[in-house]
Image (tube, rainbow, N blue to C red):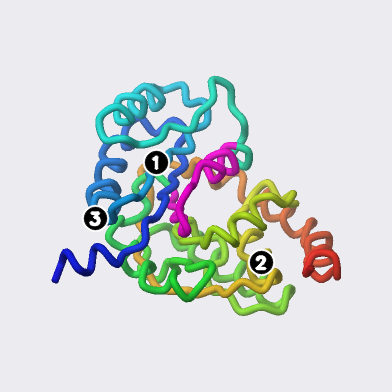
Amino acid sequence: MVFAIMTTMRPITLIMNAYNEAETIENEVRSFHENIISKIPGSQFIIAEDGSTDGTSEILERLASEIGIIHSTSKERKGYTKALKDAFKLAKTSYIFFSDSGGKHNPQDFWKLYPFCKSNDLVIGVKTSRNDQWYRKLLTWAYNLLLSYYFGVKLSDADSGFRIYSKRAVDKIFNEEWINKELIASEITLRAVFSGFTVKETPISYNQRKGESRGLPLKKIPSVIIRVLFNFPKLKNELNSREYKK
């Protein structure tokens, strides 16, 4: 019975971002490989590593030889967006699963998303059980409320870094020029909705990473919010244009 179930599984490409994660990256990669990749034959594991200087790159090169991950990297920093898009170009499967690194997500939660990917183009893990700071919970709630109101959509966690895409959604959205350089996942989510792709949200757990956030440290939050809100009208105009919906 187990063998029969596994043979009906569709392979996925797992993409994880990493920058200066030497303290945690090996355990995290091994855990995601053991709990996901090893259970779905024909799957890929790609690490979008962007010019780390703390030994992360060397660790990933060793793991590439040992367990077969694909190390998508550069000696010089490309920036998060370019590194992410380059990694997604390497995906060869019909479904692409993305997870933030840093110990924030439980790889077992992938199986909460996977049953929905055959009938949806984007499945988002909503951080309902989370142990991070109160102000981040409040900001997440407020941001999604504003996003839903301004763009006329209903989303609970548009910027979640734990999600599964269909390849057809990736082929369209990841070849577009994104407007925001921060909170990129929420823009991708909006682009999926306005492109007519089906979106499903389902609850997952979330752990506070050790130390300060790499992507959005506390001191950067005010300036990031201002820049994102400033770009809202431009993004809304593009998404509502006839040219975009073609």
Q: Three-letter amino acid code at disc 1?
A: Gly
Report the magenta residues as a range. Answer: 83-100
**Toward the viewer: 162 or 218?**
162
Residue placed under numbered mark 3 in the picture: 39
Tell me which residue sits at (56%, 60%) in the image: 159
**Toward the viewer: 235 or 224?**
235
**Toward the viewer: 236 or 121?**
121
Please provide percent x and percent y for residue 189: 61, 64
Please say if 25 is above or below 51.
below
Tell me which residue sits at (61%, 50%) in the image: 221
Identify the image quadrant of the N terminus. bottom left
Q: For marks 1 and 3, give the one nearer the viewer.
A: 3
Tell me which residue sits at (27%, 60%) in the image: 108
Judge the density around disc 3: few (<14), some (14-19), many (≥20) Cα neighbours within 10 Å: few
Along the polypeptide, which appears first: circle 2 or circle 1?
2
Q: For marks 2 and 1, give the one nearer the viewer.
A: 2
In three-dimensional space, the C-alpha distance between marks 1 and 3, rounded to whole angstroms, equals 32 Å
Residue placed under numbered mark 2 in the picture: 190
Judge the density around disc 1: few (<14), some (14-19), many (≥20) Cα neighbours within 10 Å: few
Q: Secondary structure at mark 1?
A: loop
Please provide percent x and percent y for residue 233: 83, 64
Left or right? Give the position of 190 relative to 3. Answer: right
